[in-house]
Image: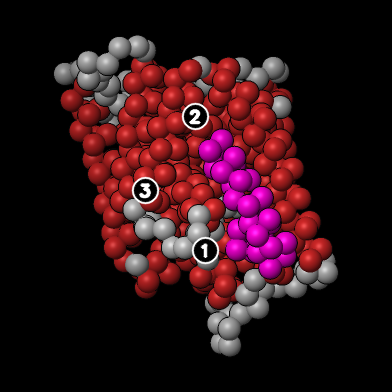
Amino acid sequence: MGAVAMGTGVMIGAGIFALTGQIAQFAGPLFPLAFLVAAVISAFSAYTYIKVSNKYPSAGGIAMILNKAYGPATITGGAALLMAFSMIINESLVARTFATYTLQLFPGDPHPVFVPILALGLIVFAFLVNIAGNRLVGGISKAAAIAKIGGILVFALVALAAAGFSFQPARASDGADASIMGFLAGVALAILAYKGFTTITNSGAEIANPHRNVGRAIMIALVICLVVYMLVAWAVGSTLSIDEIVAARDYSLAEAARPAVGEAGVWFTVLLAIVATASGVIASIFAVSRMIAMLTDMKLIPHSHFGMPGHIQQHTLVYTVVAAGVLAAFFDLGRIASMGAIFYLVMDVIIHWGVLRRMREDVGANPVVLVAAILFDLIALGAFVIMKLLSDPFIIAVSAGGIAAIFVFEKVYLVRRAPPNRTET
C-alpha cells in the first residue's frame, strides 16, 4: 500500500490538476478519451517495467533496468538521466500548479511574479520534509493519497451531479474540433500524467514479496488514477466549454467548480489542489534523489560534495531541488509539460528497446507487447513534436538540445573515467 500511495501521489499531483487544461487545448471536446488512451499506452509500458522488476526487484528502479539491458554504457546513463530530468521537470510543473491554484484564493489579478515565488516556496518545503527522513515522506504520501483521491472523487461527483450526470463532451467553439494529430498530442501529454508509476520500481528492495507485489502495486496505481482522471475530465467537460477550459488551463478544476458549487467549491478545489500538488512534489523529490544517488553508486554520473555535510542522497536532494527551482522560476506550465513529455517518451522507448533486444527471454517478456509499447510511444511522441513545432518550436529546440547535451555529457564522463586499456561503448 505504501508503494501504491507513492505512485498515485506522484501521478495525481501532476496529472489532473496540472495537465487537464493543457490536454484539452490539444485534444478538444473528447479530451477525456485522451486520458483513457494514455492509460492503455501506459499499461503496455508498465508491462516492461513489471517483467524486469519481478525478476530483479531492487531500489535501483529504472537505473537498474537500463543497466541490465545495456550495461554501464553511455545509453544507460543518458537514458537514466533523461528519466531523472523528466521527474525534476515534473516537480517544477506541479510546483507551478500549486502556485496557480493557491492564487485563486486571493481577489483580483495577482502579479505573475507570485507564481514562481510560491512554486519555489513549495520546493523548499518539500526539501525540508525529505531531509527529515523517509518515514515522514511515507506517512505524508499515504495520508495525502487518501485525502486527495477522496476529495477529487467528491469534486467529480458534485460537478457531474450539477450537470445532471450527462457525461456530454465539452462544447467547442465553431470549427474548433481537434484533429487526429491534436488528439494524439494530447495523449502524449496525458501519458505524462501516468508516468509516476515508474517510481514504484524504486521500492523493489523494500516491498514485501517484491517479485509479485511490485507489479501489483503498479497496476493498482494505474487503475486508481484512470478512474480518477476519467471522472474529473468528464466533470470538467460537462461544466465548462473547451474555450473556458483552455482560458483557465493552469487552474481548470477550480474554474469548473465555480458554476457547479459556487465560491465554496472553488475553495474546496483549491485546498485539494494544494494538498495534492504539495504531496506530489514531496514524493517526486524523494524518488528522483534516490535515483540520482543510485546512478552515482553505479559510477554512471560524477558526484561532488561541494563542501556539504551528510551522505550522497542528501546531496542529490539539493541538486534536485535546485534544478526544479530553476525550471519553476523561468518556464511556464505549458513548456514545462512539453519538455517532460518529450524526455519521458524518449527514455521509455530506450527501455523497451533494450528489454526487447537483450532481456526478453531472461524476464519472460512477450516481444509483441514490447514492440506495441515502442510503436505507441513513437506515434504519440511524433504527433506531439509536430504540433509543438507548429506552435512553439523554441521548446522543441530546447528539448532536443537538452537530450543531446545529456548524452554527450555522459559519453565524455564515461570515456574519461574508463581505464586506459578499455574504451567505453
Q: Quick one: label 2 or label 3, which is nearer the N terminus?
A: 3
For the residue pair 399 and 7, the one nearer the viewer reads as 7
Q: What's drawn in magenta, residue-wise?
A: 253-280
Where does label 2 land, which residue? 287
Contact between labelled residues 1 and 3, with CB atoms less than 8 Å apart: no
Question: In x, y percent, where is residue 84?
Answer: 41, 36
| Any part of residue 128 in sight | yes
Is residue 381 depicted above or below 413 in this figure? below
Q: Is residue 260 magenta?
A: yes
Residue 4 falls left or right of residue 198: right
Q: Residue at x 65, y 64 (%)?
A: 258
Eye-nearest disc, 2 or 1: 1
For the residue pair 347 and 359, the one nearer the viewer reads as 347
The N terminus: image quadrant? top right
Where does label 3 land, which residue? 116
Where does label 1 land, which residue? 249
Is residue 250 depicted above or below 365 in this figure? below
How far apart are the two marked residues, 3 and 1, measured between alpha carbons? 17 Å
Question: In x, y percent, where is residue 198?
Answer: 56, 36
Disc 3, SS: helix
